[in-house]
Image: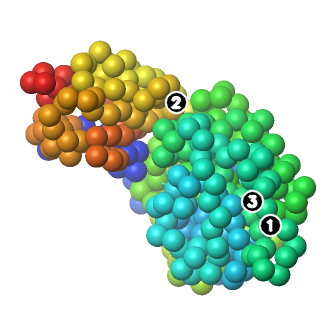
Amino acid sequence: MDWIDLRSDTVTLPTPQMRAEMAEAEVGDDVYGEDPSINRLEEMSAARMGKEAGLFVASGTMGNLSSILAYCGRGDEFILGNLSHTFIFEAGGAAALGGVHPNTLSNQPDGTLVLEEVEAAIRPDDIHQPITRLVVLENTHNRCGGTALSVEYTRAVGELAHDHGLNLHLDGARVFNAAVYFGVEVTELVDPADSVTFCLSKGLSAPVGSVLCGSNDFINQARRIRKQLGGGMRQAGVLAAAGIVALDTMVDRLEEDHSRAKQLARGLSLIPGLVLDPGTPYTNMVFLSLGDGVPFSGKEMADRLKESGVQVGVVSKNRFRLVTHYGIEDADIEMAIGAFREVMGGV
Ligand SMILES: *Cc1c(COP(=O)(O)O)cnc(C)c1O
């Protein structure tokens, strides 16, 4: 079945050009530093982010974890949002594998952390307390609705962190979506951060991988950690080849996903019983809930939509996340709206 799959932008399939380049990719042993395609992707990524060096990693999770472990030793602490991907969805890797202690602050609805709260969370020099090493921000913020953090805000957090001798890591899984949202260069958004991870495998449609970028010293250390984590891959250039196409061809089209998300939200907002989150969508995610009095659960709703060929993410009891991406065309948006209307018609 040809699904209209709005669950995530991770479901994107490689483009025909990606498959062609993967088949032809020049490869070597990347653990020896000899894979030309990997080296090229890492250089391109670093240049794109305005950093000295890049490291291809198997996933965004591995990129964030490698970064946290590069900055923090056992018993050290990092500050992050209570709704961040790293806190909720990375299986507690920093604690499990690094003994690194998370100090969570409440994410504001726009995905930010309150600056005063970040400052207050930084530990004093006191043997009773862990040592704070790092702040982690997320842009765009997944759980907060795909909201984008501004250059000014990121700069303010970077200054605060650096004034206290801390590092700032940006989980920029969808940082290109944030750049499109603000109409700024991605380098401006990531400049205040010492390191950044971005995903090739989401809106950019590559099949596998993320790239971690930062200074040469930092990347050397992260490369060793990646090896410890089992992420030293060999002829991984077949994957990098798709990543190169992703950077070359898939960034500029993200605007289309944002405009289709708006189109989707507009259509759904007219259907009685559906309640859209205020402000949604910011980028490529539409968040909505079932209103009071709708006699079925989010899960039941999702099952009924699936019968019409539409898949949606159920994020809590009555709440949905719909993500637009390369596999979603204008006609799919209209069909998805129609499927919602039909299911809700009986309410
Ligand atoms: C998807 C995602 C990641 C990493 O995901 P992987 O599935 O491990 O590649 C990290 N942060 C955010 C905000 C994400 O959305």
Q: Is residue 238 left or right of residue 40?
A: left
Quadrant where the N terminus lies?
Answer: top left
State yes or no: discs 2 and 3 in contact (Cβ < 8 Å).
no
Q: Is residue 105 left or right of residue 276?
A: right
How far apart in space, not on screen, are marks 1 and 2 (Cα)?
34 Å
Q: Nearer the viewer's eye, disc 1 or disc 2?
A: 1
Q: Nearer the viewer's eye, disc 2 or disc 3?
A: 3
The disc, 2 or 3, on the residue closer to the chain's N-terminal end is 3
Q: Amino acid at mark 3?
A: Ala
Local secondary structure at mark 2: loop
State yes or no: discs 1 and 3 in contact (Cβ < 8 Å).
yes
> Which residue has dot 2 on it?
282
Q: Is residue 55 visible?
A: no
| Numbered circle sitting on residue 121 | 3
Q: Which of 287 and 47 lies nearest the eye of the viewer?
A: 287
How many tags in the picture?
Answer: 3
Q: Amino acid at mark 1?
A: Arg
Q: Amino acid at mark 2?
A: Tyr
Q: Residue at x 56, y 55 (%)?
A: 82
Q: Is residue 125 above or below residue 40?
A: below
Q: Residue at x 53, y 73 (%)?
A: 93
Neighbor class of circle 1 (other Cα within 10 Å; few <14, some 14-19, many 20+) is some
